[in-house]
Image (cartoon, helix red, strand yellow):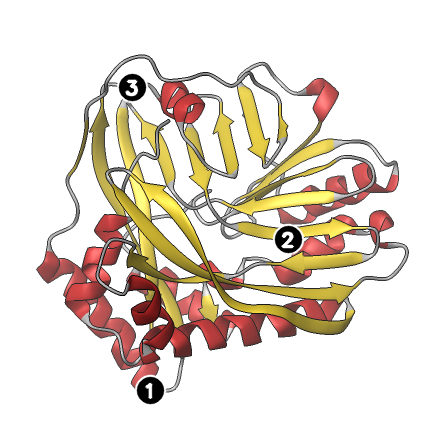
Amino acid sequence: MIWLNKENGFEQINKFSKARTPFLFITSFEQDKIFAKPLEQLDDDIFYKLEDWRNYPLKKRTKDFIFSKSPVDFTTYKKALNEVLEEIRSGNTYLLNLTFRTPVESSFTLKEIFTYAKAKFKLYFKDEFICFSPERFVEIKENTIATYPMKGTIDANLPDAKKRILADEKEMAEHVMIVDLMRNDLGIIGSNVKVEQFRYLEKIKAGEKELLQVSSKITATLPTDWKDNLGTLLSQILPAGSISGTPKKSTLNIINHIENFDRGFYTGVFGIFDGESLRSGVMIRFIEQEHGQFFYKSGGGITIDSDARSEYEELIDKIYLPLL
């Protein structure tokens, strides 16, 4: 597979959108690898789902499966978290999404996991990686762009879970920072920026658990010629704020220094332009395959008030298969 680089990739997106050609795009976290191809020319080993847009049949799982995980040990995690906290104390970042790579095993293939996973945004790419994400990146209808940053997670079965997550000062501060970052990002490419919904809850299935996740909805008005410059617009707001941090530039430098692996396509984005509108998702809940071994990538936002043990447990909670 030959990936497009940043410059050529976003230019290809511009070309397809300007011609009103329906296409799929995929960008890595650092946008150094970009895929863009018309839907009618997609290979038969690339599948997607963006809410009710899909190119594969729905199937119900008919057999049981095995799934196990071997996450990083707490000592190693805490060391990395302490490095992040030191950067926060130094004023180099206020919020950073710290992630790790976890070996996992399953009796299902990547394609089977993808097929049976229940999620709003799913992608299967050539038996190399999959995601089954609950998080939108941006959607564009007519001249309105909307983004839905997701920050804040709690076990839905805990007593008063809804009340606890909404009252948690650390979670509130983290969410406010991301909303502010995404408002600024949309302000770069649009006008009339509004926070239309602030901190609403969504319940998602996380293996044997149910999680509550906190999201907000932010909108802006795009120039009427946005379809002629879609790649350029996307390049100005990537990577997604919810999976990087704030301020974005310095936080990305810290991530590259502290994380012990290459994110690759994990926390990148993928989307479909249908000729008139755009839907896209953040590539979280992500598994990649290397030499027959599965690796699951997960993490969470770190602020000055983060507790190492609870952040570590959140990282592990996000390693799951939401199978039907």
Q: Nearer the viewer, residue 268 or 49?
A: 49
Give amino acid for label 2. Answer: Val
Amino acid residing under circle 3: Phe
Amino acid at dot 1: Ser
**Element carrying mark 2:** strand
| Quadrant (top left/top right/bottom left/bottom right) for the C terminus | top left
| Residue 176 at x, y percent in the picture | 48, 76
Q: Image quarter for residue 252?
A: bottom left
Measured as percent of width and height from the top left, residue 144 is found at 78, 58
Circle nearer the N terminus (2, 1):
1
Residue shown at 33% from the left, 87% from the top: 90
Q: Nearer the viewer, residue 120 or 233?
A: 120
Q: Secondary structure at mark 3?
A: loop
From mark 3 to mark 2, how far is it between C-alphas? Answer: 31 Å
- 82 lies left or right of 257: left
Task: Identify the residue under disc 3.
Answer: 108
Horizontal side, residue 137 vs residue 135: left or right: right
The numbered dot on residue 138 is 2
Nearer to us in this view, 204 or 224: 204
Q: Which mark is residue 200?
A: none
Q: Where does label 1 land, which residue?
A: 90
* Residue 106 visible in the shown view: yes
Give the distance between the C-alpha atoms of the residues marked 3 and 1, in whole angstroms. Answer: 45 Å
